[in-house]
Amino acid sequence: MHETADIAAPSGITPPTPTGSGAVDQACAIWHALAELGVRDAVLAPGSRSAPLVYGLARPDLEARIRAHVRIDERAAAFTALGLSRHDPAHPAVVVTTSGTATAHLHAAVMEAHHSRIPLLVVTADRPAELREVGANQTTRQAGMYRSLVRFEADLPAPTARRATDVELRTAVSTVARALAAATSEHPGPVHLNLSFRDPLVPHVEPPAADAAGASAAAGAPAADEDEHATGESRDAIVLTRRSRPVPPQPQPVPISSRTVVVAGDGAGPAARELAEQHVLPLLAEPSSGAHAGTSLVPGYPALLAQVMADRGHPLRPDRAIVMGRPTLSRSVIGALLGADDVDVIVVDPHLDWADAARRARLVVPAAIGEDPALAADATDETDTTDATDATDATDATDAAGASAGTGATERDLTAVTDTAELAARRAHLAAWSRAAAQISSGLPRSWQQTAALAVWDASGARDTLVLGSSSLVRDLEQHAGPTSARVIANRGLAGIDGTTALAGGIALAQQDPRRGAADPGRVRLLVGDLTALHDLTGLIIGPEETRPDLDVVIVDDGGGRIFSGLEHSAAPPELLRRFFTTPHGTDLAAAAAALGAEARELTTDSLGTALSQPGPGLRVFVVVQEEHSTLSSTL
């Protein structure tokens, strides 16, 4: 199903004034179409074959509509665009590169966009057909190179050299509209446009009228009698196709039992919290679930769940798990709980590529509404519940922001069932989960790295965004972090470390965009380990003429990949584990960040909270080290 299209929106775009370059003509038409369709940002890496897209975007009538961002490294450009799209998927960003090896550097971002279902428009410039497969410089097989990952792809032929024809412009605009519709469809994700351009790649002054026919023939353009517009007649508007936006699917009933748990994986959203609270069920929420708050949240569940699932007779053992989002962090969830033969697994996902790594899901529904005997039985109860309703008015106001439509009764409806024996038992069961989890967590050793991660978590408030890298730190937070009101984002589509800093920079650029009208947009913070930071040092390179993101990058530097010490590789011989898995790097990260233009400081966990609380615009890097290893160096 789709929302009704906006009938007040313009139905077409004005053809561009001829520039003397068919490639630039086409680029102008493409950018105008994208602007009309809601694109607000484009990230470009430098190159010659993509030059027409630069000239087209630089026109005065487009500069105020689509912000241009330039990144030297194509991978950083792609992940910056992905970050812009993640912040606001309704307005996906565009990444543009030249031809050749530049296109390969986009692949990691395309993969993450595919698996995370994030709209992203990938535009690669290419040689025209006559220069392909003949050994022409910087020419490779770009068409279809992301084929298995994209929702739509097109290899557009090069427009006529000196002036794009009406058919060529109409084809380009129509193709762009299809691509953007596919990117923001019911199954959102990346799309790829491979644009062939032939010389001239720069705007040219039109030749004198007397020479027009000869110049057109020499350039391969249609003669005047072949192009009805060569006589100077006004060109008709180019029709711009708009596809109505998808609407959320209708919720389907899912059975609720007294021992059901709700698992909220990455991107689950507030619907997971609402379902759990509505039916008084334990909520096992990953940090980036978007549901890590509320009365049903069980902080510190991973260690407890491992014990529960190891004992079939454990009093807290679930008999059903309702899975929302994409769980990726805990083996106690993915393997022990969702792989157990005595647990009924129900997945809530509107897409066909739902998450079911254990292959034990009995039912998949696009959206869920609880089918709860306790609630159904109480619906016939005519007991006066006025006092209970009054008592929960404050809760209604507090939880309104976390609720999502279509998941069942409202918070006020719940007051009608607070006296039932079943729900009283569920509250006791939920309390037992929370007590047991807290007890186990309190007995676990606490490292300085975990202390640093919690300091960043606690510093992030309701207006802030916290981006988490794929390292031990996100697992530390899963085990030890309490509720948060911040927006938490992580690249859990493939859980890779590629482009993490650039991604956070894109999110920060979107969050601070004045066009969004936020008086206080809050702060964006990135929490990463040292290897993740090293892997994307080019994400710190922001040119002097570029808008700098307001971003705090917190790097927990423990000299290598601590995550492997918690996996089965920890049993490897120490020398092998150190060299091939933890991979010590010996890099002064604060100096490296400062050399790339960031304000960089080295500090310890004791001073991290204070540093984060101090306001400051721009890109700041805090390298957190263990106190005995600190040099307390500071480059400001």
Image: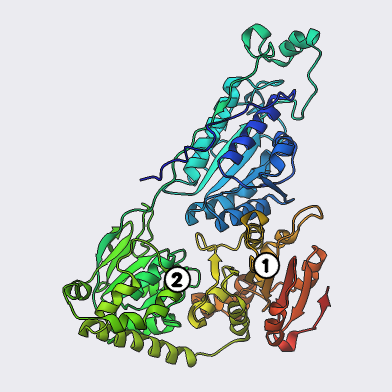
Q: Which residue is mark 2?
A: 291
Q: Secondary structure at mark 1?
A: helix
Around disc 2, counting alpha carbons within 10 Å, would you say few (fewer than 14), some (14 to 19), or many (20 or more)?
Answer: many
Q: CA distance from mark 1 to mark 2?
A: 27 Å
**Amino acid type indicated by mark 2:** Ala
Is 155 drawn above or below residue 338 in the view shown? above
- Whether residues under marks 1 and 2 lie with C-beta atoms below 8 angstroms apart, the answer is no
**Amino acid type indicated by mark 1:** Ala
Q: Position of residue 182 (x, y in %)?
A: 47, 42
Q: Secondary structure at mark 2?
A: loop
Q: Quadrant of residue 364?
A: bottom left
Nearer-the-camera pick, 584 or 589: 589
- Considering only order in the chain, which callout, 2 or 1, is on the residue closer to the N terminus? 2
Q: Position of residue 577 (x, y in %)?
A: 59, 76
Is 62 drawn above or below residue 294 in the view shown? above
Q: Nearer the viewer, mark 1 or mark 2?
A: 2
Q: Position of residue 35 (x, y in %)?
A: 61, 40
Q: Position of residue 367 (x, y in %)?
A: 33, 59
Q: Which residue is mark 1?
A: 533
**Residue 344 appears in the figure:** yes
Is 564 drawn above or below residue 142 in the view shown? below
In the picture, the disc for residue 150 is none
Is 346 drawn above or below residue 158 in the view shown? below
